[in-house]
Amino acid sequence: MSGAYVLMPEIVVTVLAMLMLLLDAALKEHHKASLTWVALVGFALALTLNLYQWGDTGSAYAGMVGLSPFTVFFETIFLISALLVVLMAPAYLRERGLPFGEFYALLAFAVLGMMFTAKSTDLISLFVSIELMVITVYILAGLARRERRSNEASLKYFLLGAFASSILVYGMSWLYGLSGQTNLAKIAVFLRTADLRSPILLIAVGLLVVGLGFKVALVPFHAWTPDAYEGAPTPATAFMAVGPKAAAFAALLRIFISAMGPVQADYTLLLGILAAVTMTVANLIAIQQTNIKRMLAYSSIAHSGYILVGLAAARPGNSTEGIAALLFYLFVYSFMTLGAFAIVAYVQAGQKQAESFDDYRGLWYRAPLTALTMTVFMLSLTGVPPLAGFIGKIYLLYAAVHANMVWLAIVIAVNSAISAYYYLRVTVVMYMADTHERVPLYRSPFIHAMLGVACLATFVIGIFPDTFLRFAQAAILSF
Amino acid sequence: MLSLVIFLPLIGVALLLPMNPGAKKLLRLTTLAVMFVDWLITVYLMFAFDRTTANYQFVERHAWISSLGLEYHLGADGLALLMIFLTGLLSWIAVLSSWNAVQTRVKEYMIAFLLLELGMLGVFCSLDMFQFYVFWEIVLVPMYIIIGVWGGPRKLYATIKFFLFTFIGSLLMLVAIVALYFEHQRLAGGAPTLDVTKLTGANYPLAFQIPVFLAFFAAFAVKVPLWPLHTWLPDAHVEAPTAGSVILAGVMLKLGGYGFLRFSLPILPAAAHALAPLMIALATIAILYGAYVSLAQRDWKKLVAYSSVSHMGFVILGVFIFNQQGMEGAILEMFNHGLITGGLFLCVGIIYERVHDRELANLGGLAHYMPTYAALFGIIMLGSVGLPGLAGFVGEFLVMLGTFSVSPVAGWLSVAVIIIAACYLLWMFRRVMFVRLNTPRYEHELIDLRPYEVLYLLPLVALIIWVGIYPATWLGMLDPTVTHILAQTVVK
C-alpha cells in the first residue's frame, strides 16, 4: 500500500493548513470571512476520505504509519471536532478581533498532529506528531494576545507541557533502550519474551504514563488544565478539551495495547487507581467553581478519569470491551463537551467576559432554546438517559464489571452523582433565577448549526446507539 | 398498544412545541385532551385484560441495542396495568388542577408534565432492565424542573436534594444491573440479556444476591420512601406546586414499590428472604414514625407528606411478608394511596390557591364557607384514616391480616398506628373545617368549589368509594399476578 493512500486525509489537511496561511496573507480584511468556508470544505473533504478508508489496513514508510479501523475511528473524532470548532469560532473571533486565518491554520496543523498521532506505529513518529499537535495548541491558547489571561494560559500550558513532553520522550528512550526497537509492533514481540519484572520496564511505563497523563489531564498531572482552559479563547478551549485529549488517548492505547500488550495486565490496577483518583478529585473541586469555563475544565478532567477506566478494564486477548468503551465514550464526549463550550462561546460573544454563573441567570427567559440546549449537554455529561452520555457511562460500567473491577464501577456511579450537583447548578441558575437585564445574544447561523448538530447527535446516539457501538467495537479489531 | 400509551405524551409535546407561549388556554386544553385520551386507552386496556392468567399481556418486543443484547420489551400484568391506570388518571387530574394556579411559563409546565407521564408509564411497562432504567431516570428531570421553577420558597434546596438522593440510589442500581447482566450470562449461558422474564429463572448464589439486592434497595427505598431514606420527601412535597405534589405522591412513590415487586423479589428471592426481617422492621418503623411525626406538624402539606411515609410503610410491610393477602394488600394500598393522598394534596392545593397559606393555625371553620369542599375532603380524609367502606381500609386490612401470620409484633404495632392515623387526620380535619377561629383571617377568599374543581375531585372520590365497597374488581386483576410473583419468590 502506498504512503499516499494511507495518508490521504493528512495530505488534505496539510494542503488546507498551507492554503489557510497563504489566503490569510493574500486576502483583504473584509474577505476574511470566506476562510471559514475554506476550512469547512477542507475538513469535510478530509473526513470523507477518512471514512472512505474504513475497513482498509496497511502500513507505510517503513512501519512509521499504519492505517486501520482504529485510526479511521480516531480521525473521525478529530475531524468532526475540527468541523464543529470551525462552526463555533467565527462569532467569538469576530467580536474579540482575533485573527481568523491564523486560528484556522493553527487548528489545521493541530489536527494534522493529532491525525498523525493516531496513525503512528513507531515511537519516533508518535513523539513528533504529539509535539506538532501540542505546540500548535500552546499557540492557540495564547491567541488572544492582548488579554493577560490568555498569555498566562499559554505560558503555563507551554512550560508544564514542555516538561511533560521531555518526560514522555525520556520514557520512550528507556523503552527503546530496553527493547532496541522503536516500532511498536516489534517492541511487543520483544516484550513477549522479556523479563517482566525488569526495573527498566517499570521506569519506562511510569515515565510514559506521566508524560501522556499530563496531556490527557489525569490527576495529579492536571494542574495546568483549569488555568489553560479558563484563559484561552473559548473556541480554542473547546478544541483543547476534545482534540488533544483524544489524540493523547490514542497514543496511550497505541503504547499500552500495541507495544506493551503482553505486559498490559500488570498495569490495570495502577490505571484503575489513577482513573478513580482523577474522577473523584476533579468532581469534588468542580463543585467549588464559580467560573463556568473552569468548571468545564474540571469536568473534562473528570471525564478523562472515566475514559481511562476503559483502558484499565481492557484485557487484550480476553475482553476488548474496555477499549471499545473508551472509544465510544471519547466519541460521545466530543459532542457533549464541544456543545457545552459552544454555548459558553455563544453567550460570551455578545458580552465581554460572561464567564461566571451570574451571567447565566435567567438565560431561559431571554434565550430559551439556548438554555434548553445547555441543559441537554449538562444532563448528557451527568449521564442521564436517554442521552449519549448515559450510554457512554453504561458501556464503561459494562467494561469495568466484565473485567472484575466492580469497585471501579461503583466509583464511576458515585462520581456521576457528585458531578450531578455542579452540572445541575447550571440549570438552576438558568431556569430558577432571574435577572432584569436582557442582554441580547449574538446571532450566528454557524454556531446555531453547530449547536443543532451537537444536540441532535447527543439525542440520536442516546436513543439509537447500536450503530455507534458497533463502530467502536469494529475499530479495535485490528490495531 | 402499550407503546401508544407510553408515547402519546410525546405527541402531545410535539403539538405543544410550535404553539405560542401566550396561548395559555390552548396549551392547557391540548395537554388535558392528550392526557385524557391516554387515560381512556388505559381504561380500555383494563377491560381487554385477561384476568385469568399471570402472563404479560399486550407484549411488544423489538431488538434495540443488539450489540449488547438489549431489547425494547413492553408488557403488562395486573400490577403494571393497575399502576398505568393510576398514572393516566392522576396525570390529567393534576393538569386540570393547575388550570388557574400556574400562570407563568405554561407551555414549559405542560411539556414537563407530559414528559413526566411518559417516563412513569414507561417504567411500569418495561420488561427489559436497561429500558426500565432509562425510563426510571427520565422521570427525574421533569420533576426536578417542576419543583425548581414553579415551587415554593425553598424550592432549590428541595429539588436538588430530591434529585441527588434519587440519582445516587439509581446509579448504584445501575452498577447492580450490569453485574446482574454478567452473572446471568455466566449461569445461564447463551447471549447476555436483561429480559426480566429470563433473569427471574436463574438461581444466583446468595453472596451475589445480597449486594445486588442492597443496590436495588438503595434505588427503590429512596423512591418509596422507606425510613430512614425518606428525608427528601417532606421538602419536595411541601415546595412542589400542587400538581407536582399530586404526581409525586400519587405515582412516583409507587415506582419504588413496583421496583421491589417486579425486580427485587422475583430475581433475588434468597436475598429477599434473608433480608425480610430487616425490611419488615424498617417498614414498621416507617409506619409508626410517619404517623407520630404527622401529629406534630403545623404545615398542612407537611402533615400530608409524612402521612405518605406512613402509608407507604404498609406497602413495604405487605410486600415482605410473602403471602397472598399481604402482597395483594400492598399493591392495592399502592393504588389506594395514589388516589387518597393525591386527593389530599389536591384539597390542600385548593385552599392554598385561594389564601396562599398552609399554616394549620391560620385556617379554621372552612366547612362553614365551603360545604361541598368539606364533603369531598371529608371522604378522602376518612379514606386515609382507613374507615371501612372506603379504599384505605381494604389495603391496610389485608396487609395487617397477612402480617399477623408472620410477625405478631409488627402486626400489633401497625394496628396501633390506625389509632394514631385517626388522631392526626381527624384532629386536622376538625381544626381546619369545623372550629371557627376567633379572628378569622380569610373570609371572602373562601369560595366554594368551582365546577372544574369538583370535576377533578369526583373521580378520585368515586374510586375511593368503589374500592372500599367492592374491591373485588381491583383485587381480581391482582390474583394471578401475585400468585406468580410469590411462586418466583420461593427460595429454590
Image: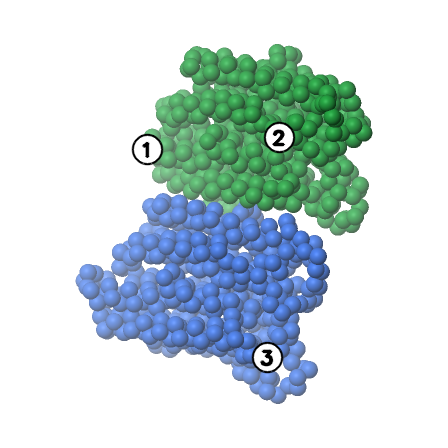
Chain identifier, colour green: B
Compared across the picture, whether A82 is left or right of B217 comes to right
| Residue named by callout 2 | B299
Whole-number angstrom distance, CA of label 3 to CA of label 2? 62 Å
Q: Earlier in the sequence, mark 2 or mark 1?
A: 1
Q: Residue B40's spot in the image, x, y percent? A: 71, 29
Q: Amino acid at mark 3?
A: Pro
Chain identifier, colour blue: A
Q: Amino acid at mark 2?
A: Asp
**Quick one: label 2, few (<14), some, or many (20+) residues within 10 Å?**
some
**Disc nearest the viewer among 2 and 1:** 2
Q: Amino acid at mark 1?
A: Ala
Of helix, strand and loop, which one carries label 3?
Answer: loop
Residue at figure coordinates x 59%, y 75% from the top left: A39
Residue at figure coordinates x 56%, y 28% from the top left: B306
Of the 4 image quadrants, the one containing the N terminus of chain B is top right
**Disc nearest the viewer among 3 and 2:** 2
Nearer-the-camera pick, A294 or B332: A294
Determine the chain carrying the residue at label 3.
A
Residue at figure coordinates x 47%, y 74% from the top left: A152
Nearer-the-camera pick, B489 or B147: B147
Q: Residue B297's spot in the image, x, y percent? A: 58, 27
Of the 4 image quadrants, the one containing the C terminus of chain B is top left
